[in-house]
Image: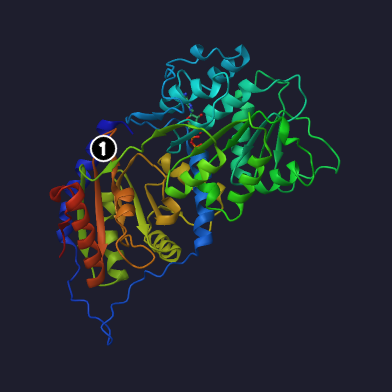
């Protein structure tokens, strides 16, 4: 949708939402039960382990639905291992002096110039002698393309044994990276790729002749040690992709370290991560000696351009009624409705359908491919409304969404306000300066309290006027 028509749609929506006051919802005080407890639906449905799995699924989803680079206007931070060596950055792929077949591959992928992180990362990764690198930037900024280019540049096709080893957290993520290798290496048909993933059985005693091996830590470890399909001493480039997702999976961290220990000293070690919490940093330091470090901060989200409202209701059915009353207004453009649990999301999508509304449901029960298909349809505008849960939609950017409805307010597993999630659901990055609208459904004293606390939080950090929801009720 073009920006102008988008802005128009928001204006119309804003006007329509101002008429929320016509809603036929009566206000009633919420009474605590006899023990003075107000019941909420904040019980988490998922275990930690399932949450962790979601990180890998999330990452895969983003890869499946992404078609372009993610814009980022922040400065790249570079920390060189040797601060006295000159800092190279490139503005074109030609400057990198790639093999002609590789340059052809890059252009065939539609890349005209290096992305922000690639400008600095590529000269470092391709330098002689090889240098180690730890790089962090949000998903979609061109990390995969960068390390694939580095691996392809270093491979000697005439030598028929594995020279580059890339670890991915899951089978599916390994396949995605493999696809990029195949695309970029298209004009190098003699280059071969093997997948070290569960189920890929080879005969004992066999040696792998493929140049690049990509796989999950457990299988790669077996192939390097127990089964000896790979001679780790001949590896020239070792890539550890999605380090943050990797360490969230039981056992992967240790396996990765054990693999790293088998590699020769002069092997180039490269580690990539979308986030850089302490645990990732500690892990990175263990597996990448003497690193250069590149960081690109995530573009900050703000609530400045978002009009926020709340609707007071007494229970879930009233929230549903309020939503139906709003429906005409929110579907001028596209809306996302967030629920706390899968169950509520399914219920809500079913109820809205019964009312004759065409909605999409994005739910944790779906396999990743199904989720990607739902998001793709929504992005194409085939459905105007997407009902989802927080876990499911975390990190997914659907740029044309201008209305966000918190059918349930975001709370953490202890039932406390989850400010970060609120910001992610509603906030916009500054790059497009897009305006938007958020409607919070409040159905109890407790949820009003949550909303007040969210509001207080953002008043402090973002300025009172930008975050204070305007009351809107019968
Ligand atoms: N220099 C470039 N010019 C144009 N498009 C690019 C460039 N580099 C990468 N892309 C494209 O941008 C998208 C994101 O790139 P890439 O997958 O490398 O990012 P990433 O940081 O590894 O993200 P993720 O970890 O989610 O895969 C892909 O569709 C990729 O083809």
Pinpoint residue 199: horizontal percent, then vertical percent. Answer: 74, 48
Question: Would you identify the image quadrant in which residue 227 lies?
Answer: top right
Q: Helix, strand or loop at disc 1?
A: loop
| Mark 1 crowdedness (10 Å alpha carbons): few <14, some 14-19, many ≥20 | many
Task: Indicate the quadrant containing the N terminus: top left, top right, bottom left or bottom right.
Answer: top left
Question: Would you identify the image quadrant in which residue 7 lies?
Answer: top left
Pinpoint residue 45: horizontal percent, then vertical percent. Answer: 46, 67
Q: Residue furthest bottom?
A: 34
Question: Which residue shows up at 33% across the image and 29% down it?
Answer: 75
Q: Is residue 1 left or right of residue 29?
A: right
**Can residue 443 be seen in the rendering of this structure?**
no
Pinpoint residue 121: horizontal percent, then vertical percent. Answer: 47, 26
Nearest the camera: 282 or 97? 282
On whether ligand 1 comes within 8 Å of the CB at mark 1, the answer is no
Question: Which residue shows up at 56% across the image and 19% down it?
Answer: 108
Q: Is residue 169 left or right of residue 91?
A: right
Question: Would you identify the image quadrant in which residue 406 lies?
Answer: bottom left
Tell me: residue 222, above or below residue 100.
below
Residue on which disc 1 sits: 434
Task: Indicate the quadrant containing the C terminus: top left, top right, bottom left or bottom right.
Answer: bottom left
Tell me: residue 47, above or below residue 396.
below
Count of marks, rendered view:
1
**Can residue 181 be seen in the rendering of this structure?**
yes
Pinpoint residue 164: horizontal percent, then vertical percent. Answer: 66, 30
Q: Is residue 129 left or right of residue 13?
A: right
């Amino acid at each position: 949708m073009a920006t102008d028509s988008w802005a128009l749609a928001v204006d119309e929506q804003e006007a329509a939402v101002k008429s929320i006051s016509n809603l036929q919802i009566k206000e009633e005080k919420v009474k605590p039960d006899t023990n003075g407890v107000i019941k909420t639906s904040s019980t988490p449905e998922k275990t930690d382990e399932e949450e962790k799995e979601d990180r890998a699924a999330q990452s895969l989803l983003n890869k499946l639905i992404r078609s372009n680079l993610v814009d980022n206007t922040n400065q790249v931070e570079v920390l060189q291992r040797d601060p006295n060596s000159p800092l190279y950055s490139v503005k074109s792929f030609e400057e990198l002096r790639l093999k002609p077949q590789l340059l052809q591959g890059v252009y065939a992928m539609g890349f005209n110039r290096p992305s922000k992180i690639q400008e600095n990362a590529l000269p470092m990764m391709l330098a002689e002698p090889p240098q180690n690198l730890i790089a962090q930037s949000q998903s979609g900024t061109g990390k995969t393309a960068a390390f694939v280019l580095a691996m392809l540049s270093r491979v000697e096709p005439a030598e028929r044994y594995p020279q580059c080893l890339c670890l991915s957290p899951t089978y599916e993520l390994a396949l995605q990276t493999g696809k990029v290798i195949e695309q970029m290496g298209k004009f190098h048909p003699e280059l071969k790729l093997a997948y070290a993933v569960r189920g890929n059985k080879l005969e004992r005693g066999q040696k792998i002749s493929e140049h690049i091996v990509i796989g999950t830590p457990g299988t790669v470890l077996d192939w390097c040690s127990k089964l000896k399909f790979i001679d780790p001493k001949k590896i020239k480039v070792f890539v550890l992709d999605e380090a943050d997702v990797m360490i969230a999976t039981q056992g992967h961290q240790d396996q990765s370290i054990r693999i790293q220990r088998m590699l020769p000293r002069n092997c180039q070690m490269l580690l990539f991560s979308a986030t850089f919490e302490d645990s990732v940093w500690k892990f990175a330091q263990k597996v990448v000696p003497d690193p250069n470090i590149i960081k690109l901060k995530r573009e900050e989200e703000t609530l400045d351009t978002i009009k926020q409202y709340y609707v007071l209701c007494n229970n879930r059915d009233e929230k549903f009624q309020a939503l139906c009353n709003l429906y005409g207004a929110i579907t001028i453009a596209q809306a996302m409705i967030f629920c706390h649990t899968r169950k509520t999301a399914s219920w809500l999508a079913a109820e809205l359908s019964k009312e004759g509304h065409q909605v999409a449901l994005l739910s944790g029960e779906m396999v990743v491919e199904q989720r990607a298909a739902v998001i793709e349809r929504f992005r194409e505008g085939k459905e105007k409304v997407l009902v989802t849960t927080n876990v499911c939609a975390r990190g997914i950017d659907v740029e044309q969404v201008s209305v966000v409805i918190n059918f349930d307010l975001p709370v953490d597993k202890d039932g406390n306000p989850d400010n970060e999630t609120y910001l992610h659901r509603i906030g916009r990055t500054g790059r497009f300066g897009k305006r938007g609208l958020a409607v919070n459904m409040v159905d109890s004293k407790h949820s009003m309290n949550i909303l007040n606390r969210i509001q207080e939080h953002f008043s402090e950090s973002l300025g009172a006027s930008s975050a204070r929801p305007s009351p809107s009720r019968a």
